[in-house]
Image (cartoon, rainbow, N blue to C red):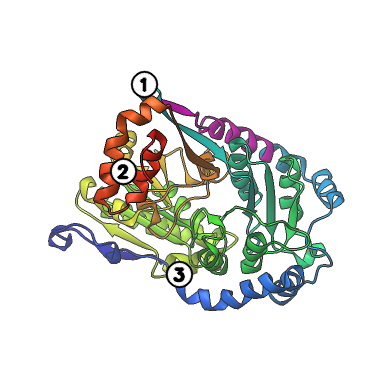
């Protein structure tokens, strides 16, 4: 079901692992740009009418208004299964504990007597949060987007999620209920590239936002790329992925279950096992055969596990295994080895790291307190997951007295002249009776 890449012995590259050697889902955002460009342009010129039209075309349902009525939010929360409500409330509680600790404090540095630079952390004023509505329902993504924005102090939060034909053109009621639990009352029934364009350009119902966050399909990612600059974005999220670094101490049932859990998301989801133990790899294969056959979404899971984006990678040593997972830079990385915490401390590239046999990715998806909006496609080598920092901007505030400026004026003039920008120096000299 899952292919193998054998990097043992002489097969392990002497110069280090090239990430192209490793499996990865095909996700051509550049090609999708030509599909989303006319959609975004249409929304820019026709506003809400265009957004509604694309909802009818792509989601099979026409709505009269994009904004979800307050009554629908209240009814969704009132009708929420009590166990689901309790689970969401606990997820929210734990996420708040973690994200509240991430808020930065302003720092003032005295550079010289009379001269200070303060770094102020200021929240974005208005954000648009995207919640997918494709093969699964993601109230957890409401939590993961909204909580850090609220803890950052964002003043206005809007959520967009695709309209559902089965629910009269509203987003899924569990998503609406999660919004209500979090106190978010600005929710829009739209998805795809048109939702990102609505946030970027605004409509008669929705004011433009400064930042758009949240995962979505390839068209959402392409719209984010296209509109970046007009809006800030968190990342261009691709198909979800898990890597597991394991030795012969790992439980093959745990490993197989965790690979399956990520493959359940999408036929393009990636599941990669990196191990020093061929015996474990064989045992995991046997577990996969049994467990996939018994699970609900076996067809999409089989497609994901048997696709070119998934594989078991055999290595000789844990050091080599660490090289492989650093090159892969997984969205989710599990460490199931002896002394897992020490091994995890050596990892450089991962969106989130799950340590030991009792920290599965599923825990992070819902109730660890961590955020599950994470970099995909190898972007964990340079990008972070969503956090309070995603919604803050650092602003330097420069405050110098006359004497402090005078003390460094000659250096400023010298550097300005060295760059052939004499007016820069004259702006300083003018304050002391010099210049033109």
Q: Name the residue under label 1.
A: 113
Q: Is residue 428 visible?
A: yes
Question: Residue at the spot x=48%, y=46% of the render?
Answer: 361
Is disc 1 placed on a helix, strand or loop?
loop
Question: Residue at the spot x=13%, y=58% of the render?
Answer: 14
Q: For the N terminus, which image quadrant?
A: bottom left
Calculate the distance from the C-alpha at mark 2 to the C-alpha at mark 3.
25 Å
Q: Mark 3 points at which residue?
A: 27
Earlier along the polypeptide chain: callout 1 or callout 2?
A: 1
User: Is residue 102 inside the magenta stretch?
Assistant: yes
Residue 242 vertical placement versus 412 (above, below): below
Residue 272 image point, x, y percent: 37, 58
Is disc 3 placed on a helix, strand or loop?
loop
Calculate the distance from the C-alpha at mark 3 to the C-alpha at mark 1.
54 Å
Badge 3 crowding class, 10 Å Cα cut-off, few under 14, some 14 to 19, many 20 or more, is some
Residue 347: mark in rendering: 2
Q: Which of 302 and 369 is in front in this view?
A: 369
Question: Residue at the spot x=69%, y=51% of the render?
Answer: 158
Residue 313 image point, x, y percent: 29, 59
Residue 330 image point, x, y percent: 39, 53
User: Is residue 318 inside the magenta stretch?
Assistant: no
Is disc 2 placed on a helix, strand or loop?
loop
In this view, which residue lies farthest toward the top? 113
Q: Which of marks 3 and 1 is in front?
A: 1
Residue 92 vertical placement versus 309 (above, below): above
Question: Residue at the spot x=44%, y=26% of the render?
Answer: 108
Badge 2 crowding class, 10 Å Cα cut-off, few under 14, some 14 to 19, many 20 or more, is some
Q: In the rendered structure, which segment of residues is drawn in magenta?
A: 88-109
Earlier along the polypeptide chain: callout 2 or callout 3?
A: 3
Q: Along the horizontal axis of the image, is 357 left or right of 97?
A: left
């Amino acid at each position: 079901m899952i292919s193998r890449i054998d990097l043992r012995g002489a097969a392990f590259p002497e110069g280090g692992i090239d990430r192209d050697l490793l499996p990865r889902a095909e996700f051509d955002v550049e090609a999708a740009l030509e599909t989303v460009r006319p959609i975004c342009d249409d929304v820019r010129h026709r506003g809400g009418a265009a957004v509604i039209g694309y909802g009818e075309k792509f989601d099979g349902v026409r709505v009269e208004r994009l904004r979800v009525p307050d009554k629908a939010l209240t009814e969704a929360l009132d009708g929420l299964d009590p166990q689901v409500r309790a689970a969401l409330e606990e997820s929210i509680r734990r996420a708040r504990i973690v994200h509240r600790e991430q808020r930065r404090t302003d720092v003032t540095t005295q550079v010289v007597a009379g001269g200070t630079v303060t770094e102020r952390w200021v929240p974005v004023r208005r954000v648009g949060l995207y919640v997918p509505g494709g093969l699964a329902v993601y109230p957890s993504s409401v939590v993961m987007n909204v909580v850090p924005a609220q803890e950052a102090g964002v003043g206005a939060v809007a959520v967009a999620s695709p309209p559902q034909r089965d629910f009269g053109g509203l987003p899924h009621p569990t998503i609406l209920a999660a919004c209500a639990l979090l106190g978010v009352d600005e929710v829009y029934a739209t998805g795809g590239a048109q939702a990102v364009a609505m946030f970027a350009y605004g409509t008669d119902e929705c004011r433009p936002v400064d930042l758009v966050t949240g995962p979505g399909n390839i068209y959402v990612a392409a719209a984010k790329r296209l509109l970046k600059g007009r809006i800030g974005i968190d990342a261009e999220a691709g198909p979800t992925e898990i890597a597991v670094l394991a030795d012969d101490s790992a439980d093959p049932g745990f490993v197989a279950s965790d690979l399956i859990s990520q493959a359940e998301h999408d036929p393009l989801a990636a599941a990669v096992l990196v191990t020093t133990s061929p015996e474990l790899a064989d045992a995991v294969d046997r577990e996969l055969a049994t467990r996939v056959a018994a699970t609900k979404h076996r067809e999409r899971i089989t497609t994901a596990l048997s696709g070119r984006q998934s594989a078991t990678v055999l290595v000789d040593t844990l050091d080599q295994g660490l090289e492989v997972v650093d090159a892969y830079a997984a969205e989710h990385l599990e460490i199931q080895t002896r002394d897992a915490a020490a091994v995890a401390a050596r990892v450089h590239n991962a969106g989130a790291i799950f340590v030991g046999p009792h920290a599965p990715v599923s825990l992070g998806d819902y109730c660890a307190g961590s955020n599950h909006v994470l970099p995909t496609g190898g972007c964990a080598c340079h990008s972070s997951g969503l956090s309070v920092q995603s919604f803050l901007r650092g602003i330097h505030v420069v405050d110098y007295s006359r004497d402090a400026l005078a003390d460094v004026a000659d250096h400023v003039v010298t550097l300005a002249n060295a760059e052939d920008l004499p007016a820069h120096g004259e702006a300083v000299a003018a304050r002391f009776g010099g210049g033109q």
